[in-house]
């Protein structure tokens, strides 16, 4: 097969959508398929241009057998809502010459768009119309719903227009793949046939990410004692997670020196969180940059409790990608989720984490206390690892997606 993929993030991103897109394309290339990726220069999650990439020019490279067409874009240092819009719009503009170049090459069987940004689908759709390829919209995040529910854009007219445009793009897609049953239900509620939808969950390399002891972890590098009780949040430091609650809870534990909070990662909210932690005098809270992927198992082994947080407004609109690694590492996850959402249902069904309501400092505090005291920690950790092995294995998930492509070609 010849497969053309559009997405704003790609390898060497270590977190989020770019990581999964990179692994997907590399897998398909390893199976003998010709894969071309149209993406931006690496910038995420640190929101700065990676070394070795031009600020104003395009670049073509070969990564794991995938031809990667890199496009320049505006990268805001402090990505608020308006700057993120400009960021995405600039990427749409710089794609145009690459799109024209690919349009006149040998036809691709599939053109695949990674959402968000949802409006990026314009380019794959135009390619489909002109070259009669099949279009797949892979929805990692229901961006318009998140923007609306978190009130990142206040104009009702603009939101209504965005929803209408999103629906048009989804209806024009031949197939829509999503990462959770909750997102499938949400897309169906927009008037999109369930027959067009594929479940394509995020995966984990459970052979690479494995349970490790505290002595094998990064505790010594982080200046932590092996006897400390460590509460870890690792991943993107953005606006959807409600990370300010960690600071409020850390303040309540301030007098207990054996309980330490660790935040690892980068993102648009990092500077604000660090400044707030300093103002609050939180000597029991430490920040560290994103760690190399090779150290991921050692990082996850630092924690006694892993925090998987998202705001109530984002319920069932996003599936936390960090959870897959925590499960593979056999971690004890404290997860904010609304009852009835797909995240809540799957965690509750397989008893692989502790669930609390989102948006509550009291619930987060009580949840941490409960996790540190529970006699069921060993069982929960075992269930987590077993679920990752049974349902999230990288080769199984990607192999199933490849088979769907092969069966529906023509």
Image (spheres, rainbow, N blue to C red):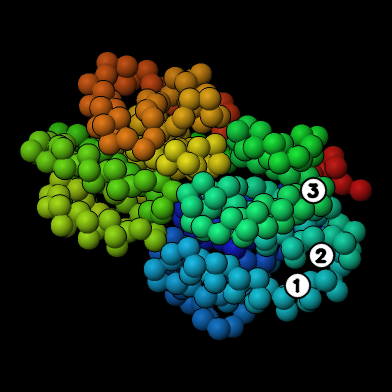
N-terminal of the two: label 2 or label 1?
1
Q: Which residue is mark 1?
A: 99
Q: Nearer the viewer, mark 3 or mark 1?
A: 3
Which of the 4 image quadrants contains residue 181? top right
Asked if residue 87 is positioned above or below residue 315 in the image, the reply reads below
Please tell me which residue lies in front, 196 or 134: 196
Indicate which disc residue 171 carries: 3
Point out residue 328 in the picture as x, y percentages from the top left corner. Answer: 45, 34
N-terminal of the two: label 3 or label 1?
1
Asked if residue 98 is positioned above or below residue 308 in the image, the reply reads below
Q: Is residue 366 left or right of residue 346?
A: left
The CA span between labels 2 and 1 is 10 Å
Identity of the residue drawn at 86% across and 57% down:
133
Which element type, helix, strand or loop, lies under badge 3? helix
Can residue 101 be spotted in the picture?
Answer: yes
The CA span between labels 2 and 3 is 14 Å
Q: Are marks 2 and 1 in contact (CB under 8 Å)?
A: yes
The CA span between labels 3 and 1 is 22 Å
Q: Are marks 2 and 3 in contact (CB under 8 Å)?
A: no
Q: Which residue is mark 2?
A: 126
Q: Give neighbour class at mark 3: few <14, some 14-19, many 20+ (Cα, 10 Å).
A: some
Q: Give neighbour class at mark 1: few <14, some 14-19, many 20+ (Cα, 10 Å).
A: some
Asked if residue 321 is positioned above or below residue 64 in the image, the reply reads above
Point out residue 259 in the picture as x, y percentages from the top left corner. Answer: 16, 36
Q: Nearer the viewer, mark 2 or mark 3?
A: 3
């Amino acid at each position: 097969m010849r497969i053309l993929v559009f997405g704003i993030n790609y390898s060497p991103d270590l977190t989020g959508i770019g990581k999964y897109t990179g692994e997907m394309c590399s897998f398909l290339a390893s199976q003998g398929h010709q894969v071309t990726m149209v993406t931006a220069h690496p910038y995420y999650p640190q929101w700065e241009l990676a070394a070795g990439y031009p600020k104003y020019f395009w670049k073509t490279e070969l990564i794991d057998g995938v031809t990667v067409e890199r496009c320049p874009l505006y990268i805001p240092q402090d990505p608020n809502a308006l700057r993120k819009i400009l960021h995405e719009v600039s990427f749409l503009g710089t794609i145009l010459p690459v799109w024209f170049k690919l349009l006149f090459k040998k036809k691709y069987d599939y053109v695949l768009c990674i959402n968000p940004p949802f409006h990026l689908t314009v380019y794959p759709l135009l390619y489909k119309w002109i070259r009669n390829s099949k279009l797949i919209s892979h929805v990692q995040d229901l961006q318009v719903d998140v923007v609306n529910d978190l009130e990142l854009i206040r104009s009702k007219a603009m939101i209504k227009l965005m929803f209408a445009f999103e629906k048009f793009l989804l209806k024009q897609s031949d197939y829509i793949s999503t990462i959770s049953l909750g997102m499938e239900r949400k897309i169906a509620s927009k008037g999109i046939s369930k027959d067009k939808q594929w479940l394509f969950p995020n995966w984990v390399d459970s052979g690479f990410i494995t349970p490790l002891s505290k002595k094998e972890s990064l505790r010594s590098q982080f200046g932590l004692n092996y006897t400390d009780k460590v509460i870890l949040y690792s991943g993107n430091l953005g606006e959807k997670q409600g990370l300010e609650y960690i600071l409020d809870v850390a303040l309540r534990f301030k007098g207990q020196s054996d309980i330490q909070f660790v935040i690892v990662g980068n993102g648009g909210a990092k500077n604000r969180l660090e400044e707030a932690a300093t103002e609050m005098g939180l000597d029991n809270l430490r920040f560290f940059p994103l760690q190399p992927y090779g150290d991921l198992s050692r990082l996850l082994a630092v924690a006694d409790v892993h925090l998987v947080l998202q705001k109530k407004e984002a319920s069932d609109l996003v599936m936390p990608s960090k959870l897959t690694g925590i499960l593979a590492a056999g971690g004890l996850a404290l997860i904010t989720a609304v009852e009835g959402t797909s995240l809540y249902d799957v965690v509750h069904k397989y008893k692989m984490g502790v669930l609390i309501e989102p948006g509550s400092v009291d619930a987060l505090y009580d949840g941490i206390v409960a996790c540190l005291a529970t006699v069921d920690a060993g069982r929960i950790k075992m269930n987590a690892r077993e679920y990752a092995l049974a349902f999230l294995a990288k080769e199984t998930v990607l192999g199933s997606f490849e088979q769907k492509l092969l069966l529906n070609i023509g």
